Amino acid sequence: MIELRDVSFKYPTGVLALNDVNLRLGSSVTAVLGPNAAGKTTLLKVLGLIYKPFKGDVIVNGINFWELRNEDERLRIKREVVYVHEKPLLMKGNVINNLMYGLLIRGIPKDKAFTKVMEFLKRLELDYLAFKKSKELSAGEAQLISIVRAMVLNPKYLLLDEPTANLDARKRRLMINLIKDQVLKGSKVIIATHDNLLAERLADNIVLMEGGRVVEVGGKEILSKLI
């Protein structure tokens, strides 16, 4: 479980993006909903241990992350929490090297990393992209590959920012199946999205945000209030 206790975050510009947020996230799939500038992306980056709040605590599996002094322990926990940006951030080179990178830095031998990634791509019928250069991918392909790159790491917590933003109907269905598959592997998935249909299809927990605050947490009944 990831828990936020009285968390506030302010950007260098002075914008208060999160204001006294208290939240416990342990459901299989949580959808974070709200209008633009509600604080959804900032929330994900705080949950993803990318942004340090200026106030409050971030608790991961009972450990207060930002109070840790042991860098090895910090790295271990960070590798359990993977955040995927809305705008894909892929390295130069081809798809297979992008997908292998996270495994290699975790000490997985190159041959085993290659085999794992290729099996993953074949299962998704995306192996035709394996040796395509990242700069040649369409927006939808790049988004899928960035999410696949996170999933091959099998993180305990997978944080997705607008995962269907650039996807056509076919890739959207594939994305939904990917997320379901990841949940079956034991990951907790947290999605920031404007896509109420995606939330209805996947989420068992809904977090509604507005003005940097969590205004409601509950089940899918919350969605009826947004129509």
Image (cartoon, rainbow, N blue to C red):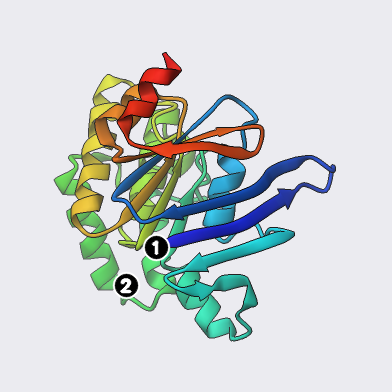
Figure check: 170 above or below 129: above
Left or right: residue 58 versus residue 11 is left
CB atoms at circles 1 and 2 under 8 Å apart?
no
Residue beneath the point at 84% across and 43% down = 14
Nearest the eye: 143 or 172: 172
Q: Which amino acid, mark 2? A: Lys
* Residue labelled with disc 2: 110
Residue 215, percent across and down?
55, 35
Figure check: 172 above or below 182: above
Q: Residues within 10 Å of mark 2 (few under 14, many from 20)?
A: few
Residue beneath the point at 56% across and 52% down = 22
* Residue labelled with disc 1: 1
Q: Does residue 126 appear in the picture of this structure?
A: no
Q: Residues within 10 Å of mark 1 (few under 14, many from 20)?
A: some
Residue 3, percent across and down?
49, 60
Nearest the eye: 99 or 150: 150
Q: Measure the alpha-carbon separation of dots 1 and 2.
A: 32 Å
Q: Earlier in the sequence, mark 1 or mark 2?
A: 1
Left or right: residue 149 versus residue 36 is left
Disc assigned to residue 118: none
Please tell me whether mark 1 or mark 2 is closer to you in this view. Answer: 1
Q: Quadrant of the C terminus?
A: top left
Nearest the eye: 93 or 102: 102
Figure check: 49 above or below 162: below
Mark 1 falls on what kind of element? loop
Q: Quadrant of the N terminus?
A: bottom left
